[in-house]
Image (cartoon, rainbow, N blue to C red):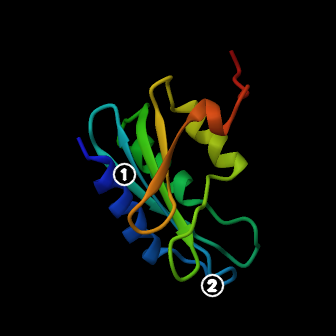
Amino acid sequence: MSSDADLARRAAAIRHRAWCPYSGFRVGAALVDDQGRVFEGCNVENASYPEGSCAETGAIAAMVAAGGRTIRTIAVAGGHDTVTTCTPCGGCRQRISEFADEDTRVLVLDDEKSWTTYSVAELLPASFHLD
């Protein structure tokens, strides 16, 4: 299984592949699923802004395509030229919560080397579920 430091490094690195010609704001995400596999994603903007896709969405889609169903940890790195604190947007918080359990952690990079850890409940209290 990947360490927190490895996930943080991968999220920071994949953000350089983002397609963000409109905002210039690069976001990368790396997650580890319940099988120990790592999936990455980066934001992709398009001319019908804001119809792009978020980094977290890309990483989750890759996990689902590979048969994964539970996020153990997800790391998010965003910023223009350098990494700055970038918590997941509301839509991504909901997406993360649908593949999370009570032990899922969200690492938000504060810079290239440090991060803050959140639970999904801290980022999305009283989340919506179709139960």
Q: Which mark is residue 93?
A: none
Secondary structure category for the residue under label 2: loop
Q: Position of residue 120 (x, y in %)?
A: 58, 34
* Badge 1 density bin: few <14, some 14–19, many ≥20, Cα 10 Å: many
Considering only vertical position in the picture, is 79 above or below 60?
below
Quadrant housing residue 35? top left
Residue found 71% across the figure and 21% down from its top:
130
- The quarter of the picture where residue 73 lies is top left
Residue 101 image offset from top left, x and y in percent: 49, 24
Location of residue 23 with respect to 30 vertically, above or below: below
Which callout, 2 or 1, points at the residue further toward the start of the chain? 2
The quarter of the image holding the N terminus is top left
- Give the residue type at disc 2: Pro
| Number of marks drawn | 2
Residue 85 place in picture, x, y as percent: 58, 62
Q: Mark 1 highlights which residue? A: 39
Secondary structure at numbered mark 1: strand
Callout 2: few (<14), some (14-19), or many (20+) C-alpha neighbours within 10 Å? few
Amino acid type, label 1: Phe
The residue drawn where x is 75% and y is 67% is: 50
Looking at the image, which residue is at 56% across and 69% down? 84
Q: Mark 2 points at which residue?
A: 21
> Which corner quadrant holds the C terminus?
top right
